[in-house]
Amino acid sequence: MRQYIILLLVLLCSVVFASGCISENKNNNTPKTYSQNNVSFNYPGSWEIANTTSPNAVVAVADPNSVQNGTPTTFVLIQKPAVSKGTNIATLYATNYASFFNNTYQLVSEGNVTINGVNALENIYKTNTTGIQKDYQAEWLSENGTAYVILCVANTNDFKNQQSNFNLILNSFKAQ
Amino acid sequence: MLNSLKKLESQFNEGKVSKRQYSLEKRVLEDKLDTVLAADRIKKLQGKEVTEKNLDYWSDKKKEDEDIEEKEALIKKYVTTPKEEPVSKTKSSGMTRGKISLLIFVVAAFFVGTGYGVYLMSAPANNSSVVITVSDSAFPTVNNTTNQTNYNSNKTTTVVKKTTTTTTTPSKTTTPTTKKNNSTG
């Protein structure tokens, strides 16, 4: 009888330890939701909302595990160009990239895409300014007459791995 | 008893036993023998089976009993039974202590594990004290001013257009004057 009690207690301890580990893992895997500043989207549970000094920034979310010298290398930045409502997104796109690519930035590809049912213009480019090669994926879209730019950034060697996280944000992005 | 009698007689003949002692012991043995015989007769009269055992049977039985007694004496003398009680006591106490300590450890581990699991479930995830700052931009810093100026010029043009339209509406009757204004703007 005592042996059964001891075995039962050992099993209970195992269950408790396992549940604790599982719940910790589950917290990291469950996506979070951002809903402020007239935009909403889901982002990975392990990411955090970051401070941003970028111009016309709405919000930035970043992977804290990618921080190097206080700056994350994997993040998504949402900016709202300072234009009047109803401005043509193609015009904004063309104006922005008219003299964008130089020795710092190099164009990789561009095209038309659909972001959560909204037509968007995509521009993928890369940079190698500080010795770390980074890939950028900029999505230009207009919702309810308001233009937004969703910039997804990651190191070149990690960009494919982060594509699922970027898609989570892009496919859930909504503007009010 | 018959053997005892025989033995007694042999002892008397050898002179080991005095006459008086011999007569006394003989009388006792004869009385015993008479009672045994009387008991057999009674059983016969009652119809009970009486196994008439011969004298050899009684002597063999006596020898057997004596042998058994000797063996038991020898066993008691030379064969030491293991002291089970004290050994069992020590064993039980050792096992009890071990079991109790194991039980205490398991109970403590249970509560520690439960507490840790509850803490993990209730603690907010990803508590990082490091401040993360993003400074990149979809608008390069070199082109930022130009873009802003471009956007600003666009704004001014729209304002101008609006003013002209407002002026035209009241002066519909004087359309030639508005045309002049347009040519000068």
Image (cartoon, coloured by chain):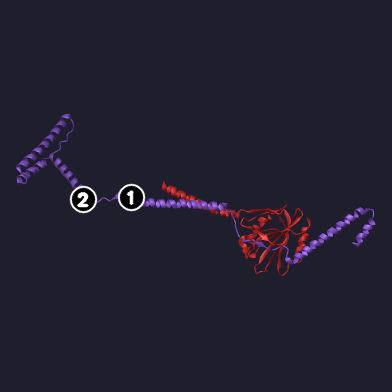
Chain colours: A red, B purple
The residue that disc 1 covers is: B89
Residue at 15% across / 31% down in the picture?
B42
Mark 1: amino acid: Lys
The chain holding disc 2 is B
Residue drawn 28% across and 50% down? B83
Q: Nearer the viewer, residue B83 or A140?
A: B83
Res. A137 visible in picture: yes
Q: Does residue B127 sit above or below B52 in this rendering?
A: below
Which quadrant of the figure has residue B167?
bottom right
Q: Which residue is mark 2?
A: B77
Q: Residue at x 41, y 52 (%)?
A: B101
Q: Secondary structure at mark 1?
A: helix
Give the left or right position of residue A154, taking residue B80 as reference: right
Residue A13 visible, this angle: no
The spot of residue B64 in percent (x, y) is 17, 44
Mark 2 against mark 1, which lies toward the viewer?
Answer: 1
- Amino acid at dot 2: Lys
First of labels 2, 1 by sequence position = 2
Work out how far the residue at label 2 is from the one at label 1, CA to CA, in angstroms: 26 Å
